[in-house]
Image (cartoon, coloured by chain):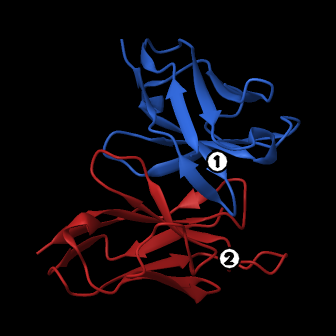
Amino acid sequence: DAVLTQSPLSLPVTLGQPASISCRSSQSLVHSDGNTYLNWFQQRPGQSPRRLIYKVSNRDSGVPDRFSGSGSGTDFTLKISRVEAEDVAIYYCMQATHWPPYTFGPGTKLEIK
Amino acid sequence: EVQLVESGGGLVQPGGSLRLSCATSGFTFTTYWMQWVRQAPGGGLVWVSHINNDGSDTKYADFAKGRFTMSRDNAKNMLYLQMNSLRSEDTAVYYCTRDAAGIEYWGQGTLVTVSS
């Protein structure tokens, strides 16, 4: 299975400041079709997860442009350019390249400092 | 608007069974693979199972093999998860999800509690 690790696991951020979350895979997430199926999800307290980013860097509809994804191979990053109060959540990366199973990172809890 | 509405969760004793349902709307159900994902209280997200468009192919996490059965009724736009021989470690919120380049949309989840 492709194991995903995230860092940091806890991320205190001042409002208006940037934030960055790393996701690393135990194996390359480049699929034989040429795509890299690495997604990012946001789970606000008491809510279901919501996808923010798919295939490394593509923002889903309605996702603010302060969220961006980057990376390749085994190393990926989710960046928030300026953190807002509504961004308080747990952020998960997930891979759908090597499946079954789809695997998720352990989550990064973003809080306001 | 894509909607995924789970039902069927509840309290069940160890060794018991539950059937989860997911009513879908707002999209062409037959076009999409579907997945179940679960989340234990205070825990992370764990993939449970997959089904392809016509229901001819299913895949399961190791912990679900032999105990869980995923199915779909394309005429009714419904997804199901039959769970047998339930254990305390199966206690979780179970999410119905739609697949597009990996998991895309999530339902609100249904809580399954396995306890005596």
Q: Is residue B47 left or right of residue B113?
A: right
Subunit of mark 1?
Answer: B
Q: Is residue B61 visible?
A: no
Task: Find residue B59 and report its horizontal and vertical position in percent.
Answer: 76, 42
Amino acid carrying mark 1 in the image: Arg
Name the subunit of mark 2: A
Q: Residue tagged by mark 1?
A: B98
**Residue at point 46%, 71% (across, down):** A5
Residue farthest toward the left in the current orientation of the protein: A113
**Viewer-closest of A8 and A69:** A69
Q: Is residue A59 above or below residue B1?
A: below
Q: Colour of chain A?
A: red
Residue at x-position 61% and y-position 18%: B84
Of A84 and A79, which appears nearest the observer? Answer: A84
Comparing A98 with A55, the one in front is: A55
Quadrant assignment, res A33: bottom right
Mark 1 Cα-neighbour bin, 10 Å: few <14, some 14–19, many ≥20: many
